[in-house]
Image (spheres, rainbow, N blue to C red):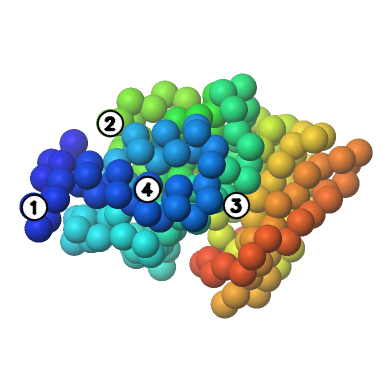
């Protein structure tokens, strides 16, 4: 594990607490499970070495292959919207750095995560295994198709933008389950929360956001 020594005399653990206090709690995130997970998971381990000094800042960072690690606040908000507890099985579309995966796995019973870039999936898997997570399954493939083998899921979170909710993800969500996904065009979206009721997804538009596009059969 990387050193917790920080920059400018501030340790990375102190920066993490400051991140949670000023970027997450101060903006209205209230779920104690989400706050605890954000305090526990060392975000600096999920960013490239050259960005470690920016790991706890209030913006996304590049992780290679045209992908990013999301802004900490966005990770916290999307996790809170899922209304997670320790009984839930979660499908994550877009493993990316693995940071969101770790936050989900800290709270939920099981996480199934799909990433189209093999190198990112492998890197995330190595980091999560080093951190001791044993409740995550990894798949390389088209995330817009979900992961039908282990469906249905209590919760689904999509960390890339789609033109609409992919039909396979609707099918793989349990009734009364929740999906959180950015919906819109390539360069601007709205974060959407959907709840499955009687085989239909009832959606609520929340606020504007900007994510990398979801590539695949039901993406861009």
Mark 4 neighbour density, 10 Å: few (under 14) some (14–19) many (20 or more):
some
Residue 178 seen: yes
Q: Which mark is residue 9?
A: 1
Residue 122 spot, x, y in % from top left? 36, 44
Q: CA distance from mark 4 to mark 1?
A: 19 Å
For mark 3, what is the residue?
158
Residue that sits furthest to the right in the current view = 198
Instruction: Evaluate if marks 2 and 3 touch, with contact meaning CB atoms under 8 Å apart.
Output: no
Which numbered disc, 2 or 4, marks the residue that appears first in the sequence? Answer: 4
Q: Secondary structure at mark 2?
A: helix
Which numbered disc, 2 or 1, marks the residue that appears first in the sequence? Answer: 1
For mark 4, what is the residue?
21
Against 190, residue 35 (above or below) is above
Residue 179 spot, x, y in % from top left? 69, 46
- Say which of marks 2 and 4 sits in front: 4
Residue 141 seen: no
- Say which of marks 4 and 1 sits in front: 4
Mark 1 neighbour density, 10 Å: few (under 14) some (14–19) many (20 or more):
few
């Amino acid at each position: 594990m990387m050193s917790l020594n920080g920059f400018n005399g501030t340790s990375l653990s102190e920066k993490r607490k400051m991140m949670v206090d000023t970027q997450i709690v101060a903006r209205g995130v209230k779920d104690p499970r989400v706050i605890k997970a954000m305090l526990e998971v060392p975000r600096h381990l999920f960013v490239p070495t050259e960005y470690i000094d920016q790991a706890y800042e209030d913006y996304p960072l590049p992780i290679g292959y045209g992908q990013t690690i999301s802004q900490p606040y966005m990770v916290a908000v999307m996790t809170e919207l899922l209304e997670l507890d320790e009984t839930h099985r979660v499908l994550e579309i877009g493993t990316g750095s693995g940071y969101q995966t770790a936050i989900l796995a800290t709270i939920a019973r099981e996480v199934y995560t799909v990433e189209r870039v093999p190198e990112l999936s492998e890197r995330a898997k190595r980091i999560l295994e080093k951190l001791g997570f044993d409740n995550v399954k990894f798949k390389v493939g088209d995330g817009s198709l979900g992961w039908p083998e282990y469906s249905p899921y209590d919760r689904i979170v999509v960390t890339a933008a789609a033109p609409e909710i992919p039909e396979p993800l609707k099918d793989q969500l349990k009734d009364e389950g929740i999906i959180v996904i950015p919906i819109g065009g390539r360069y601007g979206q709205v974060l959407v929360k959907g709840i499955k009721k009687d085989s239909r997804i009832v959606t609520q538009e929340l606020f504007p956001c900007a994510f990398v596009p979801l590539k695949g059969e039901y993406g861009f």
